[in-house]
């Protein structure tokens, strides 16, 4: 195929190619190799272009053959909203950008294709930058951050500490002194286990429902109605699971006092675990932001590492099917070589 045949009657695409060729990204990442190619080598190398230059892919709905204006994202695709927002809050303060609100890309076409149809993206902004983490390749899948096993281990430690605090012991001592005749010997063990399960379940419900979007929402999401309903669920489960029939013998104001003490313990537990959860999210968010670097040079970033792209203008090319007349990158190279040869 002759080079001129690729661009006949396609002024729009050649205009796009000119924007790419004139971009700082092109001069930094592609031009040194493009300059080595001459017109006689074109047909032999089109399948190997991506072996010589770093290419950036995005899997999603972009308009190929055009300039796309990429906007910051308000909500995440596969990350809990509270984690997404907390990282953005920290990175905005420390880096003056919201890294998790950016468009994600990869030097791996196969990784990008997991999120949608892959396209090649080229930044056109003069002051373009690529953001990436030196700690993890993919925050969502890495065990180094937001590790649920680590979270559960820390949670178990916090629960033990909660029942050892002076405030907690004062409440549990009152319950035991006042109602010792109505409680089974291992009542403290029972209540510790079921309060843990109940409170964690309530938090998980709020967490996955999207009600918790900011760290402060851990407290706000647990309304008196939610607390009361959940408390009743826990109390019924405890009663049925351990046949605590003597509790039914507590009557009138005594029963009200018993419930009030348990409710107070539950509220204290919520506040204590809410603090742990928000601290855990913030700690991991800080670790992630501390690992963020930025560069203009794609060669500095690993092939597997997720790359975050700020808002701005991006040229988008199709990946093609590895045939000369369908591969946009090959067409760009051919256009560049032809243009270089006419100077």
Image: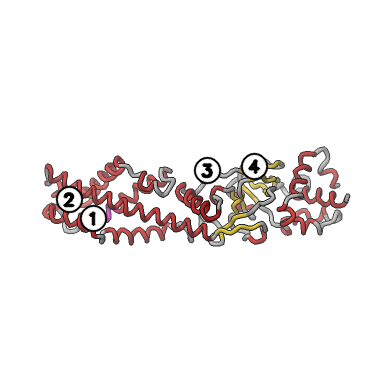
- What residue is shown with label 1? 190
Asked whether residue 89 is drawn in magenta, I would say no
- CA gap, disc 2 to disc 3? 49 Å
State left or right for residue 92 relative to residue 61. left
The magenta segment is 191-195
Mark 1 vs 2: CB contact within 8 A: yes
Q: Which residue is mark 2?
A: 244
Q: Earlier in the sequence, mark 1 or mark 3?
A: 3
Which residue position holds label 4? 69
Pointer 3: what residue? 74
Provide residue 82's location: percent of width, then percent of height. 45, 48
Which of these two is toward me, 140 or 12?
12
Residue at the right extreme, as displayed: 342
Residue drawn at point x = 29 percent, y = 44 percent: 227
| In contact (CB < 8 Å): disc 1 and disc 3 | no
In whole angstroms, how far apart are the C-alphas of marks 2 and 4? 64 Å
Q: Is tag 2's residue or tag 4's residue first in the polypeptide sequence?
A: 4
Q: Is residue 59 left or right of residue 32?
A: left
Q: Are marks 2 and 3 in contact (CB under 8 Å)?
A: no
**Viewer-side label of 2, 3:** 3
Q: Residues within 10 Å of mark 4 (few under 14, many from 20)?
A: few
Q: Nearer the viewer, mark 1 or mark 3?
A: 3
Where does the image place residue 247, in percent across and percent down from the top left?
Answer: 15, 48
**How many C-alpha atoms fall within 10 Å of the one at disc 2: few (<14), some, or many (≥20)?**
some
Q: CA distance from mark 3 to mark 4?
A: 16 Å
């Amino acid at each position: 195929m002759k080079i001129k045949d690729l661009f006949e009657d396609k002024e729009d695409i050649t205009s796009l190619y000119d924007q790419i060729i004139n971009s700082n990204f092109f001069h930094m990442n592609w031009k040194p190799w493009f300059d080595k190619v001459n017109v006689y080598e074109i047909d032999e190398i089109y399948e190997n272009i991506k072996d010589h230059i770093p290419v950036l892919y995005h899997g999603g709905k972009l308009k190929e053959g055009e300039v796309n204006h990429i906007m910051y994202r308000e909500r995440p695709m596969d990350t809990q909203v509270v984690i997404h927002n907390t990282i953005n809050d920290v990175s905005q303060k420390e880096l003056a950008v919201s890294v998790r609100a950016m468009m994600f890309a990869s030097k791996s076409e196969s990784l990008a294709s997991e999120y949608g149809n892959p396209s090649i993206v080229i930044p056109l902004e003069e002051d373009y930058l690529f953001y990436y983490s030196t700690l993890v390749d993919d925050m969502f899948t890495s065990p180094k951050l937001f590790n649920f096993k680590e979270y559960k281990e820390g949670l178990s430690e916090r629960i033990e500490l909660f029942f050892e605090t002076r405030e907690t012991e004062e409440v549990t001592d009152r319950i035991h002194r006042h109602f010792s005749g109505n409680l089974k010997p291992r009542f403290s063990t029972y209540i510790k286990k079921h309060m843990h399960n109940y409170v964690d379940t309530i938090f998980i419900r709020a967490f996955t429902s999207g009600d918790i979007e900011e760290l402060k929402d851990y407290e706000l999401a647990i309304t008196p109605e939610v607390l009361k309903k959940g408390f009743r669920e826990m109390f019924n489960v405890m009663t049925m699971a351990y046949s605590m029939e003597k509790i039914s013998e507590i009557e009138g104001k005594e029963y009200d006092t018993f419930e009030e003490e348990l409710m107070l313990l539950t509220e204290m537990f919520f506040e204590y675990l809410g603090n742990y959860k928000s601290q855990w999210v913030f700690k991991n968010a800080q670790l992630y932001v501390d690992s963020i670097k930025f560069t203009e040079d794609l060669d500095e970033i690993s092939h597997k590492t997720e790359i975050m792209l700020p808002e701005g203008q991006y040229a988008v090319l199709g990946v093609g099917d590895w045939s000369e007349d369908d591969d946009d990158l090959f067409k760009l190279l051919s256009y560049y070589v032809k243009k270089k040869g006419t100077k």
